[in-house]
Amino acid sequence: MRTTTVRRRLLLAATALLPLLALAACGSDPKIAGAAGASGPAATATEDVVSGLARSEAAAALLPEEVRKSGVLKFGSSVGAPPSAFYADQASKKPVGVDIDFTDAVAKLLGLTVQREDAAFETILPALGSGKYDVGTGNFGVTTARLKTVDFVTYVDDGQGFAVKKDDTAVQPVTDLAQLCGLTIGTGAGTTFETTLNGKKGVCADAGKKPYEVKAFSEGGALLTGLQQGRVDVEMSTINGLRHQASQEAAGVRFLNEFHRLDVGFAFRKGSPLTPAFQAAVNQLIKDGTYERILRKWGLTDSAIKESQISPPEHP
């Protein structure tokens, strides 16, 4: 099946959800919008929960003086798959998603203009150190390895999960990577998933089993197509992203299980002076209720955090 065909079917599935989403925006049962634990995250959502926010003088005062004067920050953003960040309308190329809403909401509170550039996921974190971007977004999980070169300001809790084709009943929930021995695992290039899989390949040799093969994809559509065509047996990706896929009938995907939870945050070069202001802004969103409205809009209330942190340790 060609990628364009898959995307067309996914778009039709998303369009079919619009009447339900309109009901959800009016305050009906959040399960209608695909809340986690019901039918999965919403395919798209139209509620505006950001534009009415006013500048927070307390948070903005924490910005470096030169940033306050320029009023602009350069964001490197990975825009690929819902519910994180995606193009609901390919013609307009206007990104939407939970990453986009949190970025825009924080920018409102800090009185900043977002200069966003769509960039490949694996290129963003290295580009922070070079100064190409001030901030990176892409559902970046906080890991011990990344904390050596990158600082984070957390805003949701997501993590690693697994999925298979809907009609595949042979693969059971993965609690140990040794269960994957002999299989082909598809995942995103430059992600924590690729790092985890490549770093643990020895588990199969230790168990006297054939090693699993890792195939990394730079584009989410190609990964999904690989799973649908049987070129990969299992998909490893974000918990929220896989739950969204599983909620779309056209995708033909079955969510297996969560594997490892990770905090997700805005990414900065190590030692960036921007982190205190971003932390204050996220905590203001939590305090005034905007935070909950954004998560509810995208069906991600299970990913809420109680308080934003700067570069916390990786979850055990």
Image (spheres, helix red, strand yellow):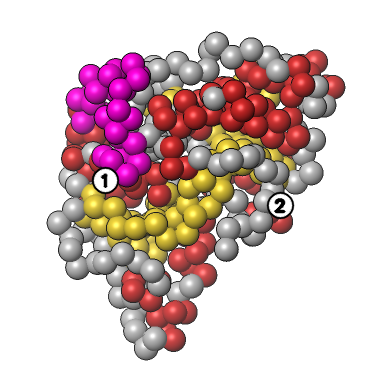
Residue in the picture at 21% in, 58% down: 230
Using residue 166 as the reference point, say whether residue 141 is left or right of it: right
Residue 139 position in % (x across, y down):
51, 42
Q: Is residue 107 visible?
A: yes
Asked which secondary structure carries label 1, the reply is helix
Residue 297 position in % (x across, y down):
40, 27
Number of numbered tags placed on the structure image: 2
Q: Which residues are magenta?
A: 13-41
Residue in the picture at 64% in, 12% down: 54
Q: Quadrant of the C terminus?
A: bottom right
For label 1, the crowd category at 10 Å Cα-Cα, with few meaning under 14, some 14 to 19 and many 20 or more, is: many
* Mark carried by residue 163: none
Q: Is residue 227 visible?
A: no
First along the sequence among labels 1 and 2: 2
Residue 158 within the segment the image draws in magenta: no
For label 2, the crowd category at 10 Å Cα-Cα, with few meaning under 14, some 14 to 19 and many 20 or more, is: some
The three-letter amino acid code for the residue at tag 2 is Thr
What residue did someone put label 1 on? Answer: 246
Residue 247 position in % (x across, y down):
25, 41
Answer whether labels 1 and 2 touch (C-beta < 8 Å).
no
Asked which secondary structure carries label 2, the reply is loop
Q: Residue furthest bottom?
A: 208
The three-letter amino acid code for the residue at tag 1 is Ala
Q: Residue furthest left?
A: 167
Using residue 168 as the reference point, say whether residue 161 is left or right of it: right
C-alpha separation, residue under disc 1 versus residue under disc 2: 34 Å
Residue in the picture at 59% in, 30% down: 286
What residue did someone put label 2 on? Answer: 149
Q: Nearer the viewer, residue 48 or 249?
A: 48
Residue 172 position in % (x across, y down):
26, 66
